[in-house]
C-alpha cells in the first residue's frame, strides 16, 4: 500500500477515512477512463473493486491493464503494487463494501449519471467520498437524486488517467467543502496534480480550453480550410511543443519578447478583434463526421489503436521524465519579485508554483504535495495564521513524506522505528488567512543511510508564504539510537531525484 497517512488529518473532515486506513477503492464503470483509473489505483497499491454492467467488462479491463502496466511501471508504481488485486462484481453493493473511495466513470449521460450516483450513494456508507469522472456535467445537476449529495464531487481526469497527472476537483451546490478537500487531498496523496476549483464551470478548465480548439478544428475541416493531418501537425510540430513546459499564458508572455505579456497584449491586442476564431461549433453533419473519421484513418495509416496508444504513452513518459529533470528555475515562474516585495525575504525562492512543481519536480511526484486549509483555530490576534501552525502544517507534510517512503503507521508500529526531526529552519515570508488553501511542495535535498535532508515550500495559490528546511534521523525507538533505513525504504528513496531550492542552507537572515 502506498504511503498510508496516519497523521495529516484533513481539517473539517474528521468523518472521512484517514488516507492511511484505505486499502481498497471502487471503480464504477471500467471503460477507457474507469479502466485507466483502476490501473492507476492498482499501481498505487490499492485493491480495486470494479462494477460495470457490460458482460465483457473484465476482459476489456484486462486488455487495458496489459497496455497500461508497463507504462505505470516506468513512472507511477509503488513496490507493493499487485496487478492481480482487482475483481469485477455484479452487485454494486458488493463492489463498494469496505471501500475507501469510489470513482464513477460511466457513460456521459446526465440521466444515467443521476440515477447511478444515487444508487452508489444508497449502498455506500455516508463517510465515503464518491467522485465522478464526468467531462462536463456539474455535480449540482448530477446530484439531484442522491440522498447524501454532500459527499459527491467531480474528479475530472484526462485520458489516459494512468499517465496524465491532472485531476480537476470541484463540488456541487450541496457538496460539503470538507468532501472537496478530502478528494483533493486524496488525489494529491496518490500522486496526482490537483486543481481544486472553487466554483462550478461547465467543462471545468482544461476541457473548455480543449473544446475551443476542437470546435475551431472541426470548422476548418468543414470549410475545407485544413485537412485533419494538417490540423494535427500544426499542433504537434508547432505550439504543442511548448505546452508541456509552459501553458498558453506563459507561452504568450514569451511571445512579447523582452516586453513580456504587457508588450504581447499591447502589440497583438487589436488582433482579438480579427476573425481568427469562430468558437462556435459547426453543425456536425454526416459529411463532416465522415470527413473527420476518414482523415484520421489516413493519418493513422497502418497503425492500430493499440500502436497509437503505445506511441502516445511512450511520448508522455519521455516528456514527464524530461520536465521532471529540468532545473526548477527553468520551469519556475519568476516568483522572486513576489516574495521579495513582501515580508522581507532577501533570498526568496525561484521555485515553480505548486501545480507546476507537482508535475515537474521529481521529489514531489513521488512524495506528493500536502494540501490543507487554514481553519479558525489557527488564526492569531493579528487575524492571520499563527506561527505555531506553520510548524504543524510542515509536520503534516513530513508525515506524508514518511508515508510515501514506507515509514508509515504500520512500519512504525512493527519496526518500532520512526523519523525524528532533529533540526529545522522556518522562514515566514507572507501571511496566510482563514480559509486559505495551503499547498506544501517537498524537496528531497539529500539522503544518507540514516538521515534525510528535506526542504518544503508552502504556497497559497502562487504565493510562497513559508519555507522549512529540516534534518531528520531514522531512530530505533526500542534501542534509542539512530539506525539505517530498511532496504525497501532505501530503494524508494533512491528513486527520488534530489532537488535543492536556492534558499536551502540559509542561516538566520
Ligand atoms: N474518454 C475521455 O477522454 C474522457 C476523459 C475524461 C473524462 N471522461 C469521462 O469519463 C466517463 C467515462 O467515459 P469513457 O470514455 O471511459 O467511456 P467508455 O464508453 O469507454 O466507458 C464507459 C463504461 O461504463 C460502462 N457502463 C455503461 N453503463 C453503465 C452504468 N449504468 N453503470 C456503470 N457503468 C456503466 C460501460 O460498460 C463502459 O465500460 C464519462 O463521464 C466521460 O465523460 C472521458
Image (cartoon, grey):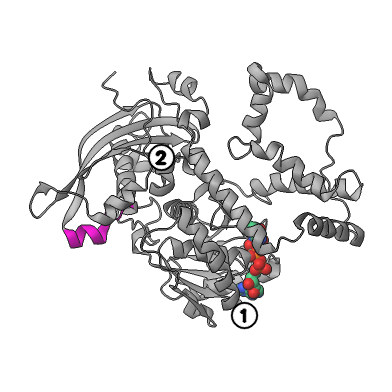
* Residue sitting at the far left: 479
Q: Secondary structure at mark 1?
A: loop
Q: Nearer the viewer, residue 208 or 72?
A: 72
Asked if residue 136 is positioned above or below residue 373 in the image, the reply reads below
Q: Nearer the viewer, mark 1 or mark 2?
A: 1
- The residue pinned by badge 1 equals 56
Q: Is mark 2 within 8 Å of ligand 1?
A: no
How many circles with numbers are drawn on the protein?
Answer: 2
- The quarter of the picture where the N terminus appears is bottom left
Quarter of the figure with the C terminus: top left
**Which residues are drawn in magenta?**
405-415
Residue 131 shows which numbered tag?
Answer: none
Give residue 413's position: percent from left, percent from top: 20, 61
Q: Ligand 1 lies in which image quarter?
A: bottom right
Q: Please check the rendered image and state whether residue 410 is part of the magenta-colored stretch, yes or no.
A: yes
Residue plotted at (87% across, 61% down):
290
Of pointers 1 and 2, the one earlier in the residue sequence: 1
> Do the numbered discs 1 and 2 sit on residues whose CB atoms are within 8 Å?
no
The chief SS type of the magenta part is helix
User: Dot 1: within a 10 Å radius of its alpha carbon, few (fewer than 14), some, or many (20 or more) residues?
Assistant: few
Amino acid at each position: 500500500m502506498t504511503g498510508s497517512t496516519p497523521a495529516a488529518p484533513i481539517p473539517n473532515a474528521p468523518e472521512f477515512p484517514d488516507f492511511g486506513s484505505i486499502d481498497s477503492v471502487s471503480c464504477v464503470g471500467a471503460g477507457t477512463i474507469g479502466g485507466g483509473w483502476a490501473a492507476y489505483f492498482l499501481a498505487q497499491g490499492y485493491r480495486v473493486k470494479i462494477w460495470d454492467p457490460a458482460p465483457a467488462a473484465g476482459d476489456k479491463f484486462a486488455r487495458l491493464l496489459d497496455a497500461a502496466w508497463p507504462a505505470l511501471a516506468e513512472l507511477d508504481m509503488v513496490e507493493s503494487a499487485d496487478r492481480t488485486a482487482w475483481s469485477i462484481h455484479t452487485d454494486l453493493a458488493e463492489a463498494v463494501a469496505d471501500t475507501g473511495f469510489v470513482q464513477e466513470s460511466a457513460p456521459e449521460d446526465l440521466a444515467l449519471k443521476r440515477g447511478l450516483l444515487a444508487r452508489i450513494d444508497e449502498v455506500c456508507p455516508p463517510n465515503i467520498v464518491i467522485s465522478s469522472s464526468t467531462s462536463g456535467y456539474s455535480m449540482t445537476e448530477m446530484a439531484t437524486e442522491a440522498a447524501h449529495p454532500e459527499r459527491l464531487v467531480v474528479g475530472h481526469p484526462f485520458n489516459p488517467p494512468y499517465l496524465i497527472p491532472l485531476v480537476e476537483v470541484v463540488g456541487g451546490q450541496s457538496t460539503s467543502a470538507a468532501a472537496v478537500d478530502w478528494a483533493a487531498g486524496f488525489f494529491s496523496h496518490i500522486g496526482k496534480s490537483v486543481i481544486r476549483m472553487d466554483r462550478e464551470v461547465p467543462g471545468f478548465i482544461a476541457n473548455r480550453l480543449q473544446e475551443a480548439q476542437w470546435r475551431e478544428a472541426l470548422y476548418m475541416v468543414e470549410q475545407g480550410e485544413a485537412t485533419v493531418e494538417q490540423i494535427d501537425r500544426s499542433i504537434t510540430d508547432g505550439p504543442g511543443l511548448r505546452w508541456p513546459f509552459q501553458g498558453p499564458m506563459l507561452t504568450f508572455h514569451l511571445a512579447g519578447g523582452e516586453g513580456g505579456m504587457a508588450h504581447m497584449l499591447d502589440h497583438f491586442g487589436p488582433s482579438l478583434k480579427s476573425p481568427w476564431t469562430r468558437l462556435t461549433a459547426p453543425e456536425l453533419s454526416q459529411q463532416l463526421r465522415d470527413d473527420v473519421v476518414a482523415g484520421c484513418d489516413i493519418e493513422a495509416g497502418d497503425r492500430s489503436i493499440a500502436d497509437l496508444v503505445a506511441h502516445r504513452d511512450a511520448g508522455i513518459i519521455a516528456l514527464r521524465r524530461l520536465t521532471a529533470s529540468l532545473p526548477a528555475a527553468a520551469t519556475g515562474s519568476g516568483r522572486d519579485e513576489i516574495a521579495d516585495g513582501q515580508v522581507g525575504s532577501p533570498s526568496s525562492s525561484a521555485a515553480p508554483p505548486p501545480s507546476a512543481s507537482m508535475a515537474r519536480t521529481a521529489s514531489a511526484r513521488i512524495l506528493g504535495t500536502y494540501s490543507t486549509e487554514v481553519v479558525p483555530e489557527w488564526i492569531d490576534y493579528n487575524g492571520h495564521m499563527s506561527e505555531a501552525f506553520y510548524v504543524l502544517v510542515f509536520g503534516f507534510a513530513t508525515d506524508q513524506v514518511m508515508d510515501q517512503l514506507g515509514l508509515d503507521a504500520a512500519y512504525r508500529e512493527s519496526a518500532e522505528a520512526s523519523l525524528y526531526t532533529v533540526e529545522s529552519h522556518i522562514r515566514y515570508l507572507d501571511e496566510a488567512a482563514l480559509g486559505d488553501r495551503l499547498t506544501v511542495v517537498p524537496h528531497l535535498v539529500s539522503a544518507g543511510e540514516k538521515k534525510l535532508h528535506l526542504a518544503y515550500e508552502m504556497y497559497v495559490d502562487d504565493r510562497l508564504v513559508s519555507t522549512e528546511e529540516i534534518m531528520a534521523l531514522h531512530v530505533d525507538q526500542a534501542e534509542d539510537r539512530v539506525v539505517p533505513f530498511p532496504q525497501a525504504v532505501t530503494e524508494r528513496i533512491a528513486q527520488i531525484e534530489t532537488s535543492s531550492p536556492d534558499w536551502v542552507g540559509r542561516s538566520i537572515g
